[in-house]
Image (tube, grey):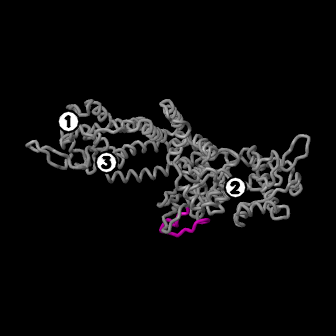
Amino acid sequence: MALSPQWLDQLRTRVTLSSVIMRTTKLQRAGREWKACCPFHDEKTPSFTVNDQKGFYHCFGCGAHGDVIRWMTDQRGLTFMDAVKELAVTAGMEMPAPDPREAQKAKRRAGLHDAMGAAQEFFVRELAGPRGNPARDYLDKRGFSPATMREFGFGYAPDERQALATALGTLPPQLLVEGGLRIAIDGKDPYDRFRDRLMLPIHDVRGRVIAFGGRILTAKDGAPKYLNSPETPLFDKGRTLYNIHRASPAARKSDRIVVVEGYMDVIALANAGIAEGVAPLGTALTENHIAELWRHVPCPILCFDGDAAGQRAVRRAIERALPLLKPGHSLKIAWLPAGLDPDDLIKKKGVAAFEQVLGSAQSLLEALWTLEMQAAPLDTPEAKAGLKARLMTHIEAIEEPDVRSLYRRDLLDKFSAFAFPRREKAPFQPRKQWRRDEPEPLSPELAKRLANLSQGGQRQRLLADVVGQLARFPELVESHREALAELGEIDPATFSLFDPVLERAETLEADGKKAIFHERWGSRSAEQSVSGLPREAHDAATAREDLAEAIELLVEGPALEKALAAATERFEHDPEGAFAEQQRLLKRKLAFDARLGQMATRRIARATPIRDSKAAAVPDENGEHIGKETDFQ
């Protein structure tokens, strides 16, 4: 089914955003807009606004932003297509004609949903009946409250081969086999898959039963302790996370999702008041699982046992996540004490102890470093070289260039600190004192170009300040060469302004002394004519940070524009993916614009990184040193 951008725009205009949001959130009129306390985070003063004319909502507290489709996917937890279908019904629009084969599949899935719902009702009845006594005894021993048992839909599958078929005799027998409820073997009668097991329904993100998990109550030779439904047209274990339909709304309030190893761990967390727990189902965490988690929170927490098996699970998850990492999206790793699962820890030390484990979760980078440091002895040069090789392999797996560069820098810094520990050195002696007349003058041509830029918008003024600073102090170029090279690839037109700056930097003498003078750089008066370049440096450390952030902003701006254009081009053949990418990038763009505005008010030239903020010792006419604050123009 192809959804054109034009059809989606028509859908957005036919649905009033505030009327959709009012279904779940109380809005109050505020002029031409509506306001409310944000449904995405806890707050007492309303900072959430809805603008029907512009067709978007925005929270000034947490930054939540989007249109009516985004509301349905983020607040309601629907997939893109499910959100569009529901809005189309509201708008009275017909969905584009589906492929006949897809229509047949949809009809078959509807029948399977009916079968799974009927099976769930049967299991719940059996748990409450006489045959459910063993299962009820087990639940009592686990300490699950009646409310928890009702919420998670516990049931019981009797120890009979034909119990389900008898109870659901009105349904087509083949439907029960296709849904994974019964097993058919050539030449033999089908029989129930789940027998003498405590049953748990597995739901999709919309809360529909799509599969089951069963825990055995009486141990039998060869019978697994836990048994899940096989993969069916409804159930894909590589994409399904247990409890995601309950964890999603809870995560919008707490801004976290906790991934544990099994569904009984999830229920133990819920029983202790932690509602945002999920678990994979009989498989390691997959790329699809990670993508689903990122739809709800930017940094889910993996909470696995601290034993060898838990470490292997974390390593697999990290290796799956590395190629997928993108700005603002990662994982955290929380280690449980060895030998304890969440339920054990909570029962022994209370829920506060588990919250402490979550609070001390490591970043993905820190967890990766920890795992590799523990992977093998590091007592020889060869072993340390092996550590570096493993780290580089992980780094190269990251596809997003900015994230890859930052991981390379941080991990190699850690490796250097470990493999080449710092030795005692003599106190640092500066090679020379910077004097107030040492900044390089600008050429009249460059000064004129910068003056014109200073009359433009925020980015142009920031660009003028950065070029001016690097031109006056070419010794600073080297520390920003990598970022400037990236700017050259993304925005060649802007980068051309830096050509004379880079050329000037190359004329610096090898010992770091003052650059060789060149007539092309002109006189001091030309420098002073550049609009907006302040005359003094207030704090060297702040100035260095401001210069680095300014260059980062110059690179990030065109990169964001390029990414948005690419997402728009993808819309025709991948509307769901393109929409999600557009919304993510627009959120980044809002944050970028805010940073750019803040930087424009500070003006990077205000804090020139040319000296420490302490008074410099300047010799007087008699050769004696006096303390003096050096002023740079």
Mark 3 secondary-structure assignment: helix
Q: Earlier in the sequence, mark 3 or mark 2?
A: 2
* Residue 70 sits in quarter: bottom right
Which residue is located at x 43 percent, y 42 percent? 558
Q: Amino acid at mark 1?
A: Gly
Residue at the spot of label 1: 522
Instruction: List x then y, in percent, for residue 539.
Output: 28, 50
Cα gap from disc 2 to disc 1, whole angstroms: 75 Å
Q: Is residue 359 left or right of residue 273?
A: left
Range drawn in magenta: 22-39
Asked if residue 28 lies in the magenta stretch, the reply is: yes
Residue at the spot of label 2: 264
Secondary structure, magenta segment, majority class? loop
Q: Amino acid at mark 3?
A: Ala
Q: Amino acid at mark 2?
A: Met
Asked if residue 517 lies in the magenta stretch, the reply is: no
Instruction: List x then y, in percent, for residue 217.
Output: 79, 55
Q: Which is closer to the viewer, label 3 or label 2?
A: 2
Q: Are marks 2 and 1 in contact (CB under 8 Å)?
A: no
- Depth order, front residue of 179/56: 179
Q: Earlier in the sequence, mark 2 or mark 1?
A: 2
Instruction: List x then y, in percent, for residue 592.
Output: 43, 50
Residue 492 visible? The answer is no
Q: Which is closer to the viewer, label 3 or label 1?
A: 3
